[in-house]
Amino acid sequence: MGKILSYFLMAGLFVALAALESLRWYIEAPINPVLFIICAAIAVTVAVWKIRDEIKKSKCLALGRDGEKAVGQFLEGLRESGAKVFHDIPGVGFNIDHVVIHSTGIYVIETKTYSKPVRGDARLIYDGETVTANGFKPERNAIIQVRAASQWLVDLVQESTGMKFPVRAAVVYPGWFIESTAKAKLSDVWALNPKALPSFILNSKVTLKAEEVQLCAYHLGRYVRSSNK
């Protein structure tokens, strides 16, 4: 909002100057307002463009924040089944949105929020490598991103515990229906609506003992606390 206000003030300043010079011109004062009018027109054009850009950014931030909150709420419900849930884990030059440690495994979860189309279905197509919406592919491939985050977590847990645990990756898209191809079902990365994620985790095969869940959660928690100091 601060940037938006500054653009309003800038545009208002030049409009005021143009009005002042116009008045002086009207009463036959020697100064011509043409230059100030041109400057005011340019300033208003720039301000409108910048304000629209800031409003768009604000909407994107709000959309992402709401998406993260919704996913977090779905994952918090897994605590009742003994899951350990972590949010916003700092990596090296990046953050992992969520990590769930459950008897069925360790999960790295990234949230991607996109505005729904004005018309048509809010449907994404996942082929195991990329996610597209009406043929459009996002600039950043979330599947590659979450795979890299998963490998980082594998290495972190192995370094801190001395044991190597597999990590499952998932990308969730709040508000979207995900249509997976046959190839996608063989992929090492899930692409899901966040409402479906808890069921996928709970219904997966048990791979960790209770003491292993506690061990991994302890070391990840210690890492998060030390990183936030």
Image (spheres, rainbow, N blue to C red):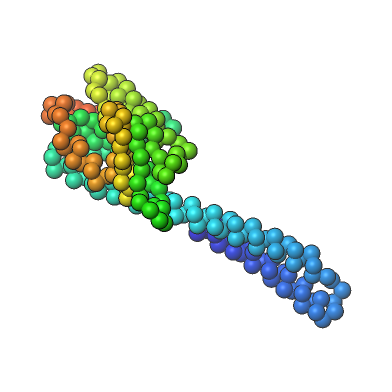
Residue occupying the point 79% across, 64% down: 35
Which is more toward the observer, 193 or 229? 193
Looking at the image, residue 62 lies above or below residue 173:
below
Which is more toward the observer, 94 or 129? 129
Which is more toward the observer, 181 or 76? 181
For this view, does 190 lie left or right of residue 63? left
Looking at the image, residue 227 lies above or below residue 155:
below
For this view, does 130 lie left or right of residue 180? right
Residue 24 visible in the picture: yes
Looking at the image, residue 152 lies above or below residue 51:
above
How many marks overall?
A: 0
Q: Hey, which residue is sitting farthest bottom in the picture?
A: 27
Residue 26 is situated, as x and y percent measured from the top left of the image, at 80, 79
Which is more toward the observer, 99 or 220? 99
Residue 218 visible in the picture: no
Image quadrant containing the C terminus: top left
Q: Hey, which residue is sitting farthest top in the picture?
A: 162
Which quarter of the figure has residue 112?
top left
Residue occupying the point 23% across, 19% down: 163
Looking at the image, residue 164 lies above or below residue 204:
above
Residue 27 is situated, as x and y percent measured from the top left of the image, at 82, 81
Residue occupying the point 15% across, 29% down: 205
Residue 41 is situated, as x and y percent measured from the top left of the image, at 70, 64
Which quarter of the figure has residue 37?
bottom right
For this view, does 3 lie left or right of residue 65? right
Residue 125 is situated, as x and y percent measured from the top left of the image, at 35, 40
Which quarter of the figure has residue 178?
top left
